[in-house]
Image (spheres, rainbow, N blue to C red):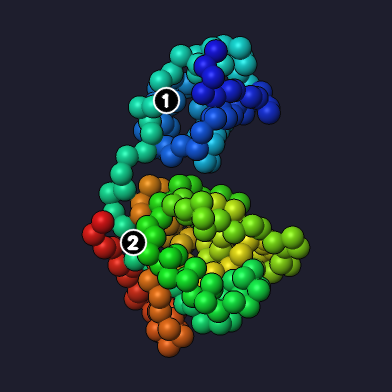
């Protein structure tokens, strides 16, 4: 049995592989491979530490587990991002309140944290929690922010927030316990469009600071369906 991951079944139709290390996956390649092995395959999803396989009918756990342990999953690790999106981030005081609370009102620490954050390149790992909630990797260990002891009843749509080592963007008003670092006026999820996401899995993301006037201008352009997200060179 491989020590790199373990297989669990939470349901006769659902199997989860939990890996010892944080890994990024090429989901399309992984899904195509599983589809070639399993006619009953319905869907494959991933997280930072797991691959989840959903079948349309119950499967034999021992047989599935035995087959999975024979697979070399290193071939499905994600390669370097193909493109990088420049994403606007408004950092007005009303959107950075959590940082001021977290750093006990120390403006110097807040400004330093924001400048570090803007210098980073993130990678979209997967969507989850809510439709269009993008989970980004790339936050250094020294920039990890603890989740709130008491979650907000409402975290506003467009809030870019940090929960532990993860960065996420709220696609709608929602309860949330992550630390807000700014506001993004560009939705990441378009339920009535194809594709419904402008940032694809594995794409890189860099946040760029915009002031309140620029933020409002972008928001209106999005509303009028004339805004085009910018792709930049890596």
Residue at coordinates 28% horizontally, 63% vertically from top-left?
A: 231
Residue 63 in which image quadrant:
top right
Whether residue 20 is visible:
yes
Callout 1: few (<14), some (14-19), or many (20+) C-alpha neighbours within 10 Å?
few
**Does residue 41 appear to the left or right of 218 in the view shown?**
right
Residue at coordinates 62% horizontally, 70% vertically from top-left?
A: 103
Whether residue 57 is visible:
no
Which one is earlier in the sequence, the residue at label 1 or at label 2?
A: 1
Residue 133 in the image: state x and y as whole percent: 54, 56
Callout 2: few (<14), some (14-19), or many (20+) C-alpha neighbours within 10 Å?
many
Farthest residue toward the left? 233
Residue 19 in which image quadrant:
top right
Residue at coordinates 59% horizontally, 59% vertically from top-left?
A: 145
For mark 2, what is the residue?
85
Residue at coordinates 34% horizontally, 76% vertically from top-left?
A: 226
The label on residue 213 is none
**Does residue 128 appear to the left or right of 115 in the view shown?**
right
For mark 1, what is the residue?
73
Farthest residue toward the right? 150
Quadrant in which the C terminus is drawn: bottom left
Q: Is residue 40 above or below residue 168?
A: above
Classify mark 1: helix, strand or loop. helix
**Does residue 74 appear to the left or right of 60 in the view shown?**
left
Q: From mark 1 to mark 2, how far is it between C-alphas?
A: 28 Å
Residue 29 in which image quadrant:
top left
Residue 164 in the image: state x and y as whole percent: 59, 53
């Amino acid at each position: 049995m491989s020590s790199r991951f373990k297989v669990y079944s939470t349901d006769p139709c659902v199997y989860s592989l939990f890996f010892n290390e944080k890994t990024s996956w090429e989901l399309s390649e992984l899904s195509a491979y599983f589809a070639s092995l399993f006619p009953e395959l319905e869907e494959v999803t991933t997280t930072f530490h797991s691959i989840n396989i959903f079948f349309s009918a119950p499967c034999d756990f021992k047989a599935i587990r035995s087959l999975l342990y024979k697979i070399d999953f290193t071939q499905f690790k994600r390669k370097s991002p193909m493109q990088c999106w420049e994403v606007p981030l408004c950092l007005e005081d009303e959107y950075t309140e959590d940082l001021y609370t977290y750093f006990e009102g120390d403006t110097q620490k807040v400004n330093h944290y924001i400048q570090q954050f803007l210098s980073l390149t993130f990678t979209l790992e997967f969507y989850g929690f809510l439709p269009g909630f993008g989970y980004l990797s790339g936050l250094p260990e020294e920039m990890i922010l603890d989740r709130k002891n008491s979650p907000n009843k409402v975290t506003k749509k467009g809030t870019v927030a940090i929960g532990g080592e993860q960065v996420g963007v709220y696609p709608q008003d929602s309860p949330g316990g992550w630390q807000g670092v700014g506001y993004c006026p560009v939705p990441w999820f378009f339920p009535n469009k194809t594709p419904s996401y402008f940032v694809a899995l594995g794409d890189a993301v860099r946040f760029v600071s915009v002031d309140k006037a620029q933020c409002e201008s972008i928001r209106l352009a999005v509303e009028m369906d004339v805004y085009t997200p910018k792709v930049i060179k890596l």
